[in-house]
Image (spheres, rainbow, N blue to C red):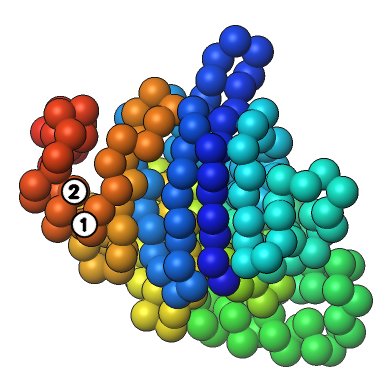
Amino acid sequence: MRIRIRNATKAFDTLEAVKNADLDVAPGEVVLIIGPSGSGKSTLLRCVNRLETLTEGDIWIDEDLVTDQRGDIRKIREEVGMVFQNFNLFPHLTALENIMLAPRTVKGVTKTASRENALRLLARVGLQDKATTYPAKLSGGQQQRVAIARALAMNPKVMLFDEPTSALDPEMIKEVLDVMLDLAREGMTMLVVSHEMGFARAAADKVVFMDQGEIIEVGTPSEVFDNPKENRTRRFLEHIL
């Protein structure tokens, strides 16, 4: 699915968290958004599935105008999976039950079919042996992989990742990035907020640098990391590379 963002502005009272952002994500493209804390990265991402409502501008997913308040946001969210920094798993449900929940309650999938799909997805993220385990007994990396499987259970056409590894210990980051790399290789359209430069070089088609709510620079990973055009991009990269 294609994402088109035009003149996106999001204000919280007098603070403009996102300012006049324009961005295109082609079908099957992996786009990484980087930038300092408070630059508007996560806010822009949350506007794509209308967890935040734009003050001005428009966002389309294929031909669906996300920013049309009359539109069926439930339908849009069925096609757009989102993985958050915090795993947001239901603590009273097992890993399997967490994955089964949305297809059963939102799409009306039968218990048998949703269970079969959840088991398949657990195997896909390397956790087939954790089906009956509750979140409290899982590591952070395992919980995030369950969260990815839960998002995939709705068969999304687009995946949004909001700093999916920032809450993890370093040794757990790779297991989550490996799942994301597999999704990228399979052609999933992905919009990712992260500072994982190894993932960017391995999987991203484009890197977007944001600062103070604005999109400052867009290019391939080699263009942005090795030869940034803007001084603000260069100053930021000096601190993280």
Q: Is residue 198 visible?
A: no
Q: How crowded is mark 1: few (under 14 residues within 10 Å), some or many (20 or more)?
A: many
Q: Residue furthest top?
A: 14
Instruction: Give the tally of numbered discs.
Output: 2
Residue at x 78%, y 47% (from the top left corner): 68
Q: Position of residue 132 (x, y in %)?
A: 68, 73
- The mark found on residue 221 in the picture is 1
Q: Where is residue 100 in the image (x, y as percent from the top left)?
A: 76, 73
The amino acid type of the residue labelled 2 equals Val
The amino acid type of the residue labelled 1 equals Pro
Residue at x 68%, y 65% (from the top left corner): 63
User: For mark 2, what is the residue?
Assistant: 224
Q: Is residue 12 left or right of residue 124?
A: right
Of the 4 image quadrants, the one containing the N terminus is bottom right
- The mark found on residue 139 in the picture is none
Question: Tag 1's secondary structure?
Answer: helix
Q: How crowded is mark 2: few (under 14 residues within 10 Å), some or many (20 or more)?
A: many
Determine whether label 1 and label 2 are within 8 Å by CB: yes
Question: Tag 2's secondary structure?
Answer: helix
Q: Where is residue 224 in the image (x, y as percent from the top left)?
A: 18, 48
Q: In the picture shown, does residue 135 fall above or below 86? A: below
Q: Can residue 232 be seen in this view?
A: yes
